Image (spheres, rainbow, N blue to C red):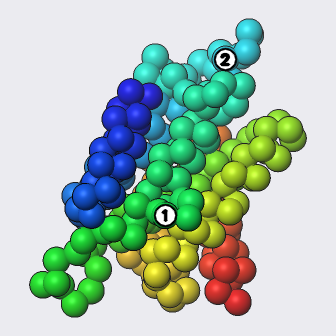
Amino acid sequence: MKAAAEFAKRIELKQESGSLSSRDFLRLRALLMIICAASWRGTDKAGEKPKDRTSLQVLPVEGDANSWPYVLGRLIFKVFGGSKPAIRSLKLDSVHDQLPADLLECWATCFWCLHACLCARLSPGERTKIQRHILPLMEQVYRRTHLSKDELLAASITDVMDGMSIQYADRLGIDPEALSRAHRSACERIFS
């Protein structure tokens, strides 16, 4: 949690100085992946100790202010959310005539993380809370990347999302196919 808080502070400072760069998005992607690695599909309720949980998996799916859907959501919100999102101060080198691959990979990681929050096995009450925060944020993220529907559905995005599913879906208790369908559905809904 300390790393996430420090990253959020760094983003604030970079936003104020107008110096947010693609390197900051590499850091965001790395941090999101670390959070996913530290997450698990269960809660810390007494008696719930799946045998495949490791000592590194410290973030439960719910029942804690720092459950992984909230941690991921807060981190992504820091960059993409609100009325003055940090992404607006992103400075890209004018050398490229297209977006750098590492930036697209970061955005794909953000999309995956948001859908993971929505596809997680949550109690009905927790699902309602997560949806209330994540659904509007997801639309902001999709729109603020300025990618077209075709770009969002291109292999440059979906391959990264599939890789995230291979790496993290089982530990988080997420159905990879449901997550892929959710991404396609979001693209249809947002860009219809």
In this rendering, the answer to whether 183 lies above or below 74 is: below
Q: Is residue 183 left or right of residue 84?
A: right
Quick check: 18 left or right of 122?
Answer: left
| Residue 42 in picture, x, y percent from top left | 67, 27
Q: Dividing the image into 4 quarters, which one contains the N terminus? A: top left
Which residue is located at x 22 percent, y 90 percent?
A: 97
Q: Is residue 47 visible?
A: yes
Residue 33 seen by the camera:
no
Q: Which residue is mark 2?
A: 44
Query: What amino acid does circle 1 point to?
Result: Lys
Tell which residue pokes out farthest to the top in this image. 46
Residue farthest along the right direction in this orientation: 124
Q: Quadrant of residue 4?
A: top left
Q: Nearer the viewer, residue 86 or 166?
A: 86
Secondary structure at numbered mark 2? loop
Q: As rendered, which of 121 and 107 lies closer to the eye?
A: 107
Q: Secondary structure at mark 1?
A: loop
Q: Which mark is residue 106?
A: none
Above-or-below relation of 43 to 28: above
Which label sits on residue 84? 1
Q: CA distance from mark 1 to mark 2?
A: 36 Å
Q: Residue 95: which quarter of the image?
A: bottom left
Which residue type does callout 2 highlight? Asp
